[in-house]
């Protein structure tokens, strides 16, 4: 009986101590939140809410957070007790660095939403063991970081065929695709790159480069293959040379503003030849070209690079202008000269150079230039290369048909041929005169010998000495004769 009485007395004293502790706690945080509207308007309600928070916190920062959220009505006593416990548990799992990611470094600086956001963002912040291994394997290919609207910071990895010696450390790999088995002999760096991608691709990923190093190698030509991973180390985008553009891990294309931003930022991470290849060719498939500022010196280096493919891309690019034509037309490789003569900057002043080019593909291409006229036809009809002569005859058919229709004549009617030939000769002569006077000035005479002595040939066709008309007339006659034999005259 005495023991029970002592128990009751001790319990009563303990309850008084707890009440004193509770009162002290409530008074402390009422003072802390004294400016809060609820404390000022309904102090008893505020005291009740603050008292409820005593059971949860482990330190003053946690108590400040809970009391504040209870006073704000974010948490309801009893109903939201599990949420309070979960929120505090999440906060305690965060690292010190993570806690400072947003507007505050202590829990009291946050509210429920910001703590939840922090935890969501950091839940995968420590990369998985697979992601860590992949990051290590890919480290030498890492070129920098960009910011993506959808995924935030992205690490960018770049592999290019120039980085992997051809035929060195080749291994056999087997790929099973749609029930078929394929074997490839591929350099080990490509295989390792592919395995690293596979480790961090989501389970439903359809990006093909995760299945074989041979696929990585194929996409590593030109501007190379780019891999983009998020802060968790997961693959989110890939962009291979010749692919349809930047693709997500499910192989859907990234388009519009997002693709433009990724390409612009990626271009700024590159330098040297790789920057040139990327800037000039990364938009060929989807029409979204990187907007990267190239200096005059940078572009000049690309036009003079040893790699003919890079020089070709430079001539085809938007950075190529009229001031670069002379350089391109003197390039040692015919493919570069071909790009120059078919560019929008090729003008009448470049026709002579193109018609005299040592390679037939350049002479053949210039025939369909908008600056090619009747005055040039004779040259190509007598070209030493058969392919050029064939193209010239096709062009002659179109020209003669056009001239005939312009004057109401029928190119298929032999009785009209003399008139067509005369009109063709006139068009060819006047085309020549325009080019001559642009260089030498209007009315500048040019004297040629005839049986009657010297005569000026810079005169209208109607005034030209008959002997000086022979070449143009012969060209038209040869064109009509050849086309008549082939039955290829352009219809009226």
Image: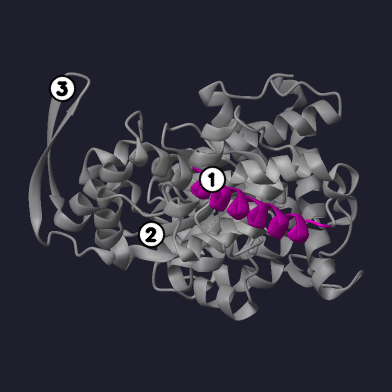
Q: Is residue 462 visible?
A: yes
**Front one among 24 and 136:** 24
Left or right: 406 as drawn, with respect to 242? right
Residue drawn at 25 percent across, 47 percent down: 194
CA separation in Å, label 2 and label 1: 69 Å
Q: Which of the two labelled residues, at mark 3 and mark 2, occupies the earlier sequence position?
A: 2
Q: Position of residue 340 (x, y in %)?
A: 58, 60
* Residue 166, quarter of picture: bottom left
Quadrant in the picture for the N terminus: top left
Q: Which of the two labelled residues, at mark 1 and mark 3, occupies the earlier sequence position?
A: 1
Q: Position of residue 187 (x, y in %)?
A: 15, 55
Q: Which of the two labelled residues, at mark 2 and mark 1, occupies the earlier sequence position?
A: 1
Q: Point out the frontmost of discs 3 and 2.
A: 2
Q: Is residue 475 visible?
A: no
The part of the chain drawn in magenta is 12-34
Q: Which residue is mark 3?
A: 180
CA separation in Å, label 3 and label 2: 30 Å
Left or right: 435 as drawn, with respect to 205? right
**Front one among 186 and 58:** 58
Q: Which residue is mark 2?
A: 158
Q: Are marks 2 and 1 in contact (CB under 8 Å)?
A: no
Q: Point out the frontmost of discs 2 and 1.
A: 1
Work out whether 457 lies above or below 250. below
Residue drawn at 43 percent across, 33 percent down: 251
Q: Which residue is mark 1?
A: 15
- Main secondary structure found in the magenta portion: helix
């Amino acid at each position: 009986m005495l023991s029970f009485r002592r128990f009751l007395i001790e319990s009563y004293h303990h309850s008084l101590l707890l009440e004193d502790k509770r009162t002290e706690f409530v008074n402390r945080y009422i003072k802390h939140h004294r400016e809060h509207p609820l404390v000022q308007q309904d102090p008893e309600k505020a005291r009740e809410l603050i008292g409820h928070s005593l059971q949860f916190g482990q330190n003053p920062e946690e108590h400040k957070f809970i009391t504040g959220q209870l006073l704000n009505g974010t948490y309801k006593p009893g109903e939201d007790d599990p949420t309070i416990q979960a929120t505090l548990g999440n906060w305690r799992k965060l690292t010190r660095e993570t806690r400072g990611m947003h507007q505050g470094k202590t829990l009291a600086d946050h509210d429920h939403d910001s703590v939840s956001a922090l935890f969501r963002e950091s839940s995968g912040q420590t990369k998985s063991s697979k992601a860590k291994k992949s990051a290590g394997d890919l480290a030498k290919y890492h070129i920098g970081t960009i910011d993506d609207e959808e995924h935030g910071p992205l690490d960018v990895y770049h592999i290019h065929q120039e980085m992997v010696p051809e035929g060195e450390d080749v291994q056999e790999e087997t790929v099973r695709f749609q029930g078929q088995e394929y074997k490839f002999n591929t350099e080990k760096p490509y295989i390792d790159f592919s395995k690293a991608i596979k480790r961090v691709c989501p389970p439903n990923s359809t990006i093909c480069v995760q299945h074989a190093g041979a696929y990585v190698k194929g996409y590593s030509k030109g501007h190379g293959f780019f891999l983009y991973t998020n802060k968790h180390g997961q693959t989110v985008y890939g962009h291979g040379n010749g692919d349809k553009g930047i693709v997500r891990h499910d192989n859907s294309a990234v388009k519009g503003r997002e693709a433009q931003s990724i390409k612009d930022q990626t271009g700024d991470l590159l330098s040297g030849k790789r920057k040139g290849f990327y800037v000039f060719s990364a938009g060929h498939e989807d029409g979204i070209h990187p907007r990267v500022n190239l200096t005059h010196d940078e572009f000049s280096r690309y036009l003079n690079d040893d790699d003919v493919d890079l020089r070709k891309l430079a001539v085809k690019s938007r950075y190529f202008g009229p001031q670069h034509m002379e350089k391109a037309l003197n390039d040692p490789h015919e493919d570069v000269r071909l790009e120059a003569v078919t560019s929008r900057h090729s003008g009448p002043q470049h026709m002579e150079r193109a018609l005299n080019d040592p390679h037939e593909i350049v002479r053949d291409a210039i025939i369909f230039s908008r600056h090619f006229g009747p005055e040039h036809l004779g040259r190509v009809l007598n070209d030493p290369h058969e392919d050029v002569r064939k193209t010239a005859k096709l062009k002659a058919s179109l020209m003669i048909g056009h001239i005939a229709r312009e004057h109401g004549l029928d190119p298929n009617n032999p009785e009209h041929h003399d008139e067509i030939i005369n009109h063709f000769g006139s068009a060819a002569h006047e085309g020549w005169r325009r080019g001559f006077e642009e260089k030498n000035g209007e009315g500048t005479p040019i004297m040629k010998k005839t049986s009657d002595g010297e005569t000026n040939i810079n005169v209208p066709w109607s005034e030209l000495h008959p002997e000086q008309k022979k070449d143009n007339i012969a060209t038209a006659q040869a064109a009509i004769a050849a086309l008549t034999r082939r039955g290829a005259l352009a219809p009226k």
